[in-house]
Amino acid sequence: MDLILVNIIDGLVTGLLLFMLSAGLTLIFSMMGVLNFAHASFYMLGAYFAYQISLALGFWMGLLIAPLIVGVMGAGVERYGLRRVHQYGHVPELIFTFGLALLIEELVQFIWGKNQMPYQVPDVLNFTAFAIAGNSIPAYKIFMIFISVAIFIGLLYVLTRTRVGMIIQAALSYPRTVESLGHNVPLIFMGVFGVGTALAGVAGVIAGPVLGTFPGMAFVLGSIVFVTIVIGGLGSLWGALVASLLIGWVTTFAKSYNIAMSDILNGIGFSTPENLSDSLWRDLWTVTSPQIADILPYILMVLILIFRPYGLFGKRDA
Amino acid sequence: MSEQDQITTDPTKPAQRMRAGSMTISATPWIIAAVLLIAMPYLFPSRSALTIMNQMSITIVFALAYNMLLGQGGMLSFGHAVYMGVGGFVAVHVMNLISDTGAPFPMPFLPIVGGLFGMGLAMIVGSFSTRSAGTVFAMISLGVGELIAACSVIIVVFFGGEEGVSGYRDEGLPFFGFDFAQQIEVYYLIAAWLMISALLMYLYSRTPIGRMANAVRDNPERAEFLGYSARWVRYYSFAASGFFAGIAGGLFAINYEILTEENLNTASSGVILLVTFLGGVGFFFGPIIGAIAFTLLQTVLSLHTELWAFYAGVLFVATVMFFPGGLAGLIMMHVPVFQIGKAKQLVLPYFKTLIPGAVAVLGVSALVEMTFHYRHAATGDNEMTVFWTTFDSHAILPWVIALVVTFGALYLTRLNAPSLREAWAEANTPDGGAA
Amino acid sequence: MRNPIKFGLVAALAASVSASAAMADTVKIAFIDPLSGPFAGTGTNGLHQYEFAADRLVNEAGGVLGGDMFEIVAFDNKISPKESLIQLQVAIDQGIRYIAQGNSSGVANALTEAIEKHNRRNPDDRVLFLNYSAVDPALTNDKCNFWHFRFDANADIKMDALTDVMAGDDSIKKVYIIGQDYSFGKAVAAAAVKNISEKRPDIEIVGNELHPIGKVKDFTPYARKIVSSGADAVITGNWGADMLGLGKSVLENGYTGPIFTYYAAADGITAAFGETGKGSLRLVAEGQINPPVSMRATEYYNAFKEKYPEGNISQARITNVIEMLAKAINEAGSATDVVAVANALEGMEHEGLWGGKMMMRPQDHQLIQDVHIHAHTDDGITFDYDNSGFGLVVENTVTMAAMDSPTTCEMKRP
């Protein structure tokens, strides 16, 4: 029972981290209709920049400055790259971001080398906040939860309560009308892209110390972010939140409890074959939930796309 | 107009208004290609050259199959490697079956087995993924690709875990006396299959169903009004593409005698997307150029520099940004110039711009290599070799030379670029025609 | 239109492939390992160790066969079996007779089969496979062949040594086994279960599970299970980011016991563990770095550090590969007759640079050597890893580990 509570907290941390990435991605998508494959690469850049800054100025300056740099880079990519490719259509745009992801990974390896970076949790937060039945919850995780919740609330406030947010929302649905009202829509696009990538940068800064800062970190997270926003419904902020938490909890619980396929199969009436090691189906029988935990989101996504192509909260067809 | 290039629809570029395959209607290119394929081993008899050419041929078949989706059908797949991979795995299992039972089955027919299973899998997945194109299709392909790739380490019986499944290609029934133990025999087997599959895929694009795939790509609603089900048209393209991907898998099985997890993973799926796009999706022969260029980049350039993937990434992003028609588009841009008969006018401007341009590119890459060497090489190991010149990367002189050459070349390129643009416009204007 | 293009590219291909023709008075060793991509760090570091060992141990001592120098030729296989096979062909065409590879048992498996086939089909230019790191037991058991020599202790031998040490520790009552879901992870788990049940039947195995390789973002849930199972020891075969993620997660979530593992050092991992791993991480490996065994070893390491300040000698066995190959070539009197060299390597006894005797077991071509249990610490470190102040100190040694262990290898000799 205690473990359930611990798992809920862990799943929440994973989910909220995923949300910080998917929030930016889904904003960008609803604005420009482009799935940014390089989004996780900006997350990686955030971690590397923060590491570099933290060497000189400490963790907190890294948290402040690194996302800004990433955001400016993101805006630059939109202004000088995507905008150019935009005229060719959506597929080249997608492929452009795909190529950009490869390029950023190579660039990071070029500058920082290929090894893990010793990017550490700051000393102020390096203690155990509390423990539940011997399972300690590090203070850093609580910090991560606070940061992500604060960002979500801030984002929601800006989008629904401020003038800028209204213009952005209007530009989502009727870009031409907004443009003829005298707003600079390309500038808004650039801004949204910059903010979206800066969010990914924040996620990188705070995830780097716990999940590791290495050239493969974007690849590990890359496609799962897509899965999240597709499940949540493309363009929906709430959908991104729900899907992130869902994925966070599903994978956490699947890893924590050894649910064996043989139990499920026995439960629905199949009996375990006599000589399991000779059976052609032996691999199916020995599968356990931790083995497949990280591919569960993909199964979920395929099922959702088959039965509800809009995603959980999506309003329009992808 | 139905074959108008979907990616670049700029009406001011006449090349893109040409019908996609019109260059290859005659039999001549096919005969030249066949002669070339037969002659290649005489020009490059070493086993490594044969291996690289085999790899090229396999990539060509796969890329052409992929382009049946992307270029001709407008469907972007992020998990196409699984159809090639599954076809290949089945082919290896059949190969092992032949070895174990001594069944009289000649190796040259093995790719058909791979193709049928690739098609079978595509038919299963396609039954739900081809309902719509666009993002939904792309995302389902990504999900299914990830799932099957993940299965490859879990389902050891079929996929052999991360070590893969291996077999012996020389234990089948000899085919006219060949047992395919030597690379050269395998080369001709693969070359034959390359010709057959390329021809079949080309003919497929000429059939009504292949034409309809173009129509559905460009405007599904209109295609529906004409009485064609967009979904079924996509489904047929998908199944056919799966078949030829499976053939590529079967060829892979014969060439390498082993299939592993890497044949299925998303990285392989990504690579084939790069290859196809680099070559150009708008033309039938685009993926062929892409496959040749990429294999050279991956296999040969990586012998010379650790940074090959960096260069590949730059090339790729530059292609998307500046030449969305790919290498093939770049070539086909010149067709009208030749037709007008003004190609000669371009020679000098090209000479004046592209030579400094090429020098600038090489100069930049030399600077990149020098920076890399400066940062990462061992202490005391200051000597490095770039472009057959050995020098000290920590001395100031090579840097000055490289910088001067690079920026000088860049300056010359910029200086001459406007005249090239003018010449290009002039060469594309028929005499007496409206400008 | 495409024909001129094709010719141009093909000309480039021919030029590149034939660029470096074999020279008569060098013995070339092809180093086929990842030099780009996610595992490039390990690969590049290995290459440096090879180049350094060849220069210092062979070339500066006058070479082999009275003056032939060793040359390491690097090939980037991008840790892909397919690319490895292509690069193998390129290497063979350049006249190279010795292939060194180590990262990934999957690649080693593809290479050993390809080399076996190649040697059978082309008896004129046979090659030897010097496997310096791939530890899948199958390579010297069911899949063994005459051309393959393994210089690292395989996963079973290491586990044998590891459990010998564990068996002596009475405080260990519960053990948790966790690993990556592929052949090596499974081999580690199977060997751990077998050895523990033989040597200490009283130890309870409270967990035995696999997780997807390279796909886990957050190890916290696994760490929770380990902590709540009450385990006093964790055994894992994880490497790379999976090792770091698991280790840090387990330690940060309240686990304080030992973590017995294979690969948790160098390539940034030692630095990233830092203080966190002290007192917990125990590594099983050959080659004693700390405390240094001899003046010769100290000088060698210092010289290496001088040349590669960022590098580590993380694979001490590489010096054994070079020294034993040189010895075998001298003994065979030829660098091109690989059958003679292989026969000389078979059963060869050797005194390693890092101490201890070793012997290439003729039955299965597995090098039998001392295996050490190291601790990750910053006390008593002469040579640290990643310039972090932390490194590995030998705590226990099993001499000539698993010398009489059985093998299922049926060696077919030419």
Image (cartoon, coloured by chain):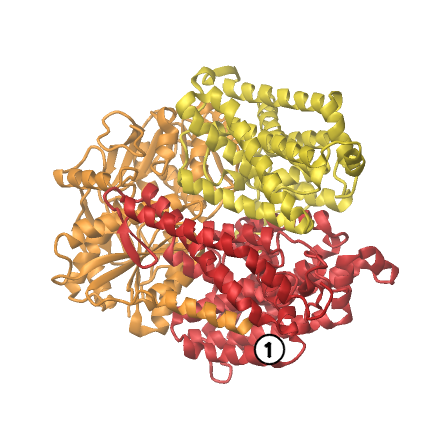
Vertical placement of residue B217 versus C246, above or below: below
Q: Amino acid at mark 1?
A: Pro
For mark 1, does the 10 Å Cα neighbourhood hold few (<14), some (14 to 19), or many (20 or more) residues?
some
Residue occupying the point 51% across, 31% down: A46
Residue B349 image position (x, y, % from top left): 53, 63
Instruction: Report whether residue C142 is seen.
Output: no
Q: Residue at x 65, y 53 (%)?
A: B77
Task: Give left or right: position of B295 versus C173.
Answer: right
Q: Residue at x 42, y 61 (%)?
A: B300
Q: In this picture, is B190 found above or below C270?
A: below
What color does chain C have in the rendering? orange
Q: Secondary structure at mark 1?
A: helix
Q: Which chain is red?
A: B
In the picture of the structure, the residue carrying the numbered disc 1 is B29
**Tag 1 subunit:** B
Q: Position of residue C179 (x, y in %)?
A: 46, 39
